[in-house]
Amino acid sequence: MERQMRVIPYQVKAQAEQVSETPRGVDLIQAPEVWSQSKGKGITVAILDTGCDTDHPDLKGRIIGGRNFTDDDDSNADVYEDHNGHGTHVAGTIAAIANGTGVVGVAPEASLLIIKVLNHEGSGQYEWIISGIRYAIKQKVDMISMSLGGPEDVPDMHKAIQEAVDNNILVVCAAGNEGDANPDTDEYGYPGYYNEVISVGSVNLARQTSGFSNTNKEVDLVAPGEDIQSTYLNGGYATLSGTSMATPHVSGALALIKNIANAEFERSLSEPELYAQLVRRTIPLGYPARSEGNGFLYLTALEELKEVFEPQRVASILQS
């Protein structure tokens, strides 16, 4: 029997045919406040998931291509449609662009490469995941977003992720939904537990940690993961919960950060440098590091710090 990986378990809270608003999670991380600096243009995010509703009106203008590595659609590599819903929801949080109605993602001008590694059941062989990661590397994407996980530490998958990072690709993964609401216990899921990835935990829309979110020493940060509204199957919309929903907030944010930071430093920053820029845009929530890592994703954190510590005040402190 082939070893299997699955989408991180998630909850479908509601579905709708039409919406017209900026999702609360996108607002909470302050994405609209930095859109004057970047909306992700020129950045390509590879989504390794269940595929995507490629005809969705909020997504079809953002998709630049894709590939199917699963057994869906007779294993046709050129058909990467979503028959599950999970991948379409993730894609919308990253880069949906509302057309009068609909939702808007964190980075509405980013490009999406849809790499289908999980089938209609939300499961996939590890070999599909590994092939998908290597395909993303060959396509020279800027980042990889993976809201999937399994219990096994698979060396070949770990090696593929290391190859991606060595190629200056940011790899963002869901921490997992096996949490027991106790920060003193460890819950592990792979690839989210690998040190090389950016492991994302979940909080609710009141910025309280989600009881289902895995806690361990590799959690890097948290983002909104409960009651997240985004794109769904058949051109519709759905409200879902899980660390799977928190992860694309960070993937989209990194598309913005990469553009903003590269412009500020007037050069292309490396993967570790971009991770540092991400961490600078977090705020502590007061939970243990095993729950929240460096804190909550907050894209205007630097600007707000600059207002508090303006140059004149800093100079005065240093002279005192």
Image (cartoon, grey):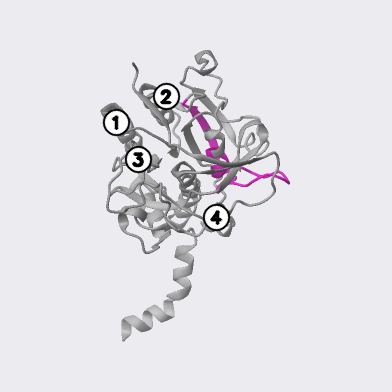
Crowding near the residue tagged with mark 2, few <14, some 14–19, many ≥20 C-alpha atoms within 10 Å: many
Q: Nearer the viewer, mark 4 or mark 1?
A: 1
At a point 51% along the width and 18% down the height, the residue shown is 72
- The reply to whether residue 9 is in sight is yes
Q: To which residue does mark 4 refer?
A: 31
User: How many numbered discs?
Assistant: 4
Q: Are marks 4 and 3 in contact (CB under 8 Å)?
A: no
Q: Residue furthest top?
A: 74
Q: Look at the image and give the residue range highlighted in magenta.
A: 90-118
Where residue 214 appears, x then y in whole percent?
A: 35, 46
Q: To which residue does mark 3 refer?
A: 192
Secondary structure under tag 1 reads loop
Where residue 229 appears, x then y in whole percent?
A: 59, 46
Question: Is 49 displayed left or right of 175 in the figure?
Answer: right
Secondary structure under tag 3 reads loop
Q: Are marks 3 and 2 in contact (CB under 8 Å)?
A: no
